Image (cartoon, rainbow, N blue to C red):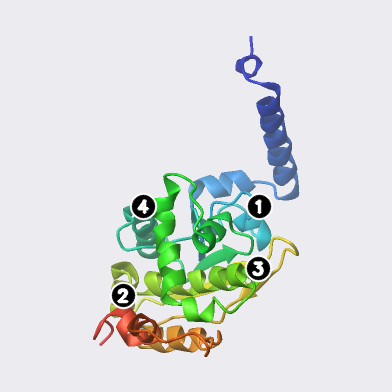
């Protein structure tokens, strides 16, 4: 009796699809899996949302083994997340990736929940990081339509996470020893399949604050909203990252 007989039909279909895919891949590229089993040498790391509509390798036309991937809800990278930091360290120090790409996507349910203050359960605690982005940059968001707010927050969230990756000890140490690794920020359009480059590439310590500040300038603030000390702090990239953090 086959082990497959004890699983639901929909899972049997997945296994059958896997076998077809493996056979077709081997036919197109004889020896592909033998080579893949011997080494993993990706040049790229993708940090993206866990959304099932955003398959990293397929979006950029890469095969297994060519992209190292880390995913979580709303593509967040924070310095207390040892899972993300360990994955980044492995990618940088052991796989020697040259490019780390933080990728958000429009229509992100996590970003929508943070923007609208919706409760989703345990994930509310995780999405607090995205809510913090929204609060820091409220003057760049509140004058927009609800749909524009969500799209812009998706982009701002990516920009902030790019900065977080660049300021992590892993990347700072890599740059200090002269390793070439750059951090980029993109957003994926689920509705059209296109990736948008947010032009926030950080490839050495002295670029981080300037790139971050220039990126935020692309999102005009509403002059009609009253300024507050929190707004002024949010607009100061040096303060955002901490005094002397990059000196």
- Residue 202 sits above or below residue 171 on the image: below
- Residue 238 sits above or below residue 95 on the image: below
Query: Could you say where residue 174 lies in the image, as x and y percent from the top left?
Result: 33, 73
**Could you tell whether 30 is left or right of 166 in the image?**
right
Secondary structure found at label 1? loop
- Asked whether 222 or 37 is in front, the reply is 222
Quick one: label 4, few (<14), some, or many (20+) residues within 10 Å? few
Residue that appears at 68% across and 40% down? 22
Which numbered disc covers residue 155? none
- Asked whether 14 or 196 is in front, the reply is 196
**Could you tell whether 20 is left or right of 108 in the image?**
right
Residue 189 in view here? yes
On the image, numbered disc 3 is attached to which residue? 147
Which numbered disc covers residue 172? 2
**Label 1 to label 4: alpha-carbon separation:** 22 Å
Of the image marks 1 and 3, the number of the one nearer the N terminus: 1
- Asked whether 231 or 245 is in front, the reply is 231
Secondary structure found at label 4? helix
Residue that appears at 52% across and 45% down? 37
- The answer to whether mark 2 and mark 1 are in CB contact below 8 A is no
On the image, numbered disc 4 is attached to which residue? 83
Question: Which is in the foreground here, disc 3 or disc 4?
Answer: 3
- The answer to whether mark 1 and mark 3 are in CB contact below 8 A is no
Quick one: label 3, few (<14), some, or many (20+) residues within 10 Å? few
**Label 2 to label 4: alpha-carbon separation:** 18 Å
Of the image marks 2 and 1, the number of the one nearer the N terminus: 1
On the image, numbered disc 1 is attached to which residue? 53
């Amino acid at each position: 009796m086959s082990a497959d007989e004890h699983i639901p039909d929909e899972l049997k279909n997945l296994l059958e699809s896997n076998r077809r895919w493996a056979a077709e891949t081997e036919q197109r590229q004889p020896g592909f899996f033998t080579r893949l089993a011997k080494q993993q040498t990706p040049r790229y790391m993708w940090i993206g949302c866990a959304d099932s509509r955003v398959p990293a390798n397929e979006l950029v036309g890469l095969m297994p083994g060519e992209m190292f991937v880390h995913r979580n809800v709303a593509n967040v990278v924070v310095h207390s997340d040892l899972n993300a930091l360990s994955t980044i360290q492995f990618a940088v120090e052991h796989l020697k990736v040259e490019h780390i790409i933080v990728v958000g996507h429009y229509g992100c349910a996590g970003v929508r929940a943070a923007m609208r203050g919706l409760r989703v359960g345990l994930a509310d605690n995780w999405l607090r990081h995205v809510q913090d982005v929204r609060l820091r940059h409220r003057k760049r968001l509140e004058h927009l339509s609800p749909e524009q707010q969500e799209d812009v927050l998706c982009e701002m969230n990516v920009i902030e996470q790019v900065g977080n990756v660049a300021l992590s000890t892993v990347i700072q140490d890599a740059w200090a020893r002269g390793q070439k690794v750059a951090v980029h920020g993109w957003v994926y359009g689920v509705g059209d399949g296109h990736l948008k480059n947010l032009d926030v590439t950080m490839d050495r310590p002295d670029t981080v604050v300037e790139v971050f500040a220039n990126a935020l300038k692309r999102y005009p603030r509403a002059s009609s909203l009253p300024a507050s000390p929190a707004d002024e702090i949010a607009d100061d990239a040096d303060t955002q990252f901490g005094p002397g953090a990059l000196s």
